[in-house]
Amino acid sequence: MEILRSTYLTLNDYNRISERDAWFDILKDLFDGKQNDYLQKNVMTIAGTAGRADAGLAYENPEEWVCKSLDLLAETLSDAGDTGRFAPACVEYTVYGVHFIDKILGCDVFFKDGQWYSKRLETPVGTLKAPDLNNNETWKLAKRAALAFMKADVKLPLFGTPTLSSALNTVVNIYGSDALLAMAGNPEPSKRDLKIINDTIMSLHTWYMRNIPARQLQPVVSWSRTQPPGYGQLCGCTTQLVSASTYNAFIRPLDELLLGLYPGGGMVHLCGVHTQHIEAMSEMGCLKAVQLNDRAALDLELYYKGLRKDQIIYLIPFENMGVDKALQITNGERLVICDAIKAPERKKYGR
């Protein structure tokens, strides 16, 4: 399976690549605390385009899925005009949703009512086995997709990884409330399993960094959480369930190790009530951006005032925290507005 000739030409177009790189320069200036003509007049907004072929094909034939996704992406871009905002072109291999790491670790992951779920492991906390990544079928699928993307030899699109999650998110997925209870009452087994999970996730990040050029590699939600080249990401959803002291004792060192893999550090995604961790976040040198949506977005002012002056906030606006209100709070400083994804309609959502 190969991409169309027209796809190859569109996704290697010099002008499109130059425009993307110019936006990367603007975004890097924002991360570095520098001003430029665009940032002096505008709030940084990102609203990209993702090419996505039939979801079922991603599991049956990753190579064909990548090629068809690239063809769809090129077809969509041919009709796109200048939006006045960063509109990165992306392909993202999002198999198993937020349970990709659970699947690699041996959980039964299944699709129901429009989303992915995972069943908890039956083994107790402290007995997790490190996966054999060389022979792990889920990881083999993901690698095939990434290598197919590289084989297509297109320089414009960003490649979004599957959801590589985080140690805390994953340990709660695979053990449920037992994971939280164990941290309080049986810390050593908890630390053992958390390390295995984090080491596994770090191995996957490292593989992607070695095989996808930094200028094209992006973590999850590559079309709107886009960062400058050389930045990573982790999911902090579950930190709302733990105290500041528990986060500092068990999770923060692992998050710092993971983000420290990347030359620029990286981002944490937050979607609940996580404000008990703002002090810790402000102290983490490798944490360069915080992404807020849904409930977390309501606390924008607390993050804006509590984080360092060199930490960027990515905001997904919604009815209770619109763009106007966000601008009143931040005056547009250190702020990236993540707009809605524009993607070809998908025929299937399962498999």
Image (tube, grey):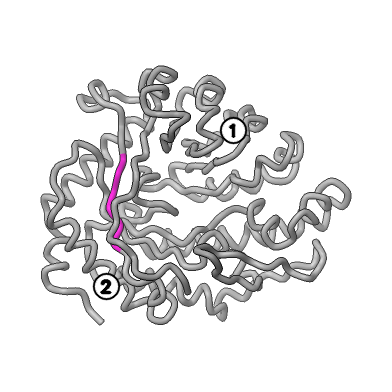
Q: Nearer the viewer, mark 1 or mark 2?
A: 2
Type of amino acid at the residue the image marks with label 2 = Lys
**Residue at horizontal 49 percent and vertical 37 percent from the top:** 292
Type of amino acid at the residue the image marks with label 1 = Met
Residue 187 shown left or right of residue 133 in the figure = right
| Residue 203 occupies quadrant | bottom right
Residue 281's label in the rendered image is 1
Percent of width and height locating residue 156: 22, 57
Quick one: quadrant of the N terminus? Answer: bottom left
**Residue at horizontal 38 percent and vertical 81 percent from the top:** 61
Q: From where the camera sits, is residue 307 visible?
A: yes
Residue 260 shown left or right of residue 180 in the figure = left
| Residue position for label 2 | 68
SS state under label 2: helix
Whether pointer 1 and pointer 2 mark residues with C-beta atoms closer than 8 Å, the reply is: no
Foreground pick, 335 / 52: 52
**Distance CA(mark 1)–CA(mark 2):** 40 Å
Q: Which residues are magenta?
A: 46-51
Q: From where the camera sits, is residue 190 visible?
A: no
